[in-house]
Image (tube, rainbow, N blue to C red):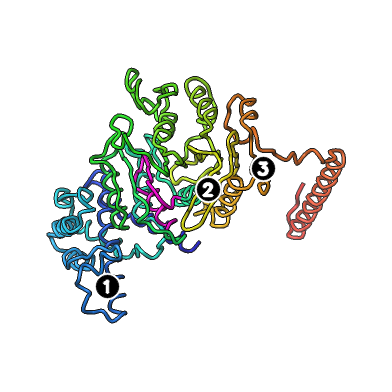
Amino acid sequence: MAKEKNQKSMEETLWESANKLRGSVESSEYKHIVLGLIFLKFVSDTFEERREKLIAEGKEAFVDMVEFYTMENVFYLPTESRWSYIKQNAKQNDIALKIDTALATIEKNNPSLKGALPDNYFSRLGLDVSKLSSLIDTINNINTIEDKGHDVVGRVYEYFLSKFAIAEGKGKGEFYTPKSIVNLISTMIEPYKGKIYDPACGSGGMFVQSVKFIDAHNGNKKDISVYGQEYTATTYKLAKMNLAIRGISANLGDVPADTFAKDQHKDLKADFIMANPPFNQKDWRGVNELLDDARWAGYDVPPTSNANYGWILNMVSKLSVNGVAGFVLANGALSGGGEEYKIRKKLIENDIVEAIVILPRNLFYTTDISVTLWILGANKKLRIFEQNGKIKTHRDRTNEILFMDLRQKGVPFEKKFTQFDDETVEEVTDTYHVWQSDKEAYKDIPEYCYSASKDEVRAKDYSLVPSKYIEFVNRDENIDFDTKMQTLQGEFAELLKEEEQSKKELLKVFEELGYAIN
């Protein structure tokens, strides 16, 4: 909890510092300024950490050899690109130029960052030196690598989005996916080997967490290849930056582009899909656009009023023969009529829906909306396969859907947020994997999980709302209301007596003080 409090303090401090730029630049520029500096601090912190390790190992002779950094996915930084150099010159009149030079040098020396870093950005801003210097001082106090499991770049970006309802943020229903949700998805679908795809990759958080999952389970991240797409230019650059600093090679398309209007991975068949697409996106296509798109072949065309099922069908079309997708959507996609009903019915009849998991509120940093995790599987039949060096069996799950309710599973986080702790992730994942592999060992649990047959879902008119299937305990049914009312009346009478006694004692005190109370 102490670390989380410090993290929150860091974000608030960054905001307060950046807010001092008010009047010098538009408020929507704050995040770009801060992120550029955070990036410099991050790559410098990792560089210095690696340099110190080499020295500690008695390898001083190698501290300026690039290969000894790249082998650990660390960028080698020449002197003029190091944070210590920027800090040392923070009060110089040409500090903006020095920052631009540092960024340009890093990008030039690292092909994976091509097009990711701002070009001559700080010089063009024309910021007052004292204000820029003050911001550098603030960022200098941040240890960007203290928490190895924390996505500092993505989280800072999200924090600044939360301050403005800007077009590239929550105004379009886009929300940075917290580590807690991504960790749950990756642990459930286990992306050990193959192609991973995210059609709305944002700052790349899904990919980052996938690699962390592989590392944590002794897998080999060289066994995966990453594909993604992002519409917003600044976020596209951020994703490339975020992945590059972690040594993750990715194909995010040649340019930032709308996944629907310009699909840059048309022929892709992914083994794993992880996504948090924009919720309830309106007017995502023109009335007469994308009517014959191959992605909804065999299904009704998703309505222009809401892109939720457009995203679903886009992902379904990208699944390999044994592919699995885990993604979050607003709860409204679980039910409803029109084209969405027809598509949902077809998905269920085609036996693609594997699990529906309702999540708690307040998981996101910028909205308290309740969302659902969908897991879709292209092959729900009996399958025996090798996974991370072990033989694994998935039983035949055709005509079955697992429903789970996690609304009581979250734990408090930074007072107003919710997250899943490791124990919860393990519990949920174990339940899902047991259901996948051993029907006899799996048990329905009231208020938590239920395995429904396709006939049961048909009987509920193809609704995927978990509460329609999961048993809920009526805690009122065994209460003797007459006895309960007598108890409550007795307690209330006792309270009235105590209140009357308190009044008498108070009157006595006033009388002893010489005050007459009528």
To which residue does mark 3 refer?
447
Mark nearer the N terminus (1 vs 2)? 1
To which residue does mark 2 refer?
384
Mark nearer the N terminus (1 vs 3)? 1
In this rendering, is residue 348 above or below 68?
above
Viewer-nearest residue: 101 or 300: 300
| Residue 226 appears in view | yes
Kindly give the residue lying farthest to the bottom in the view shown.
58
Label 1, residues with CA under 10 Å away: few <14, some 14-19, many ≥20:
many
In this rendering, is residue 207 above or below 472?
below
Q: Amino acid at mark 3?
A: Glu
Viewer-nearest residue: 508 or 125: 125
Instruction: Answer left or right for 321 relative to 356.
Output: left
Residue 210 is one of the magenta-drawn residues: yes
Label 3, residues with CA under 10 Å away: few <14, some 14-19, many ≥20:
some
In this rendering, is residue 479 above or below 294?
below
Q: Position of residue 247 (x, y in %)?
A: 30, 57
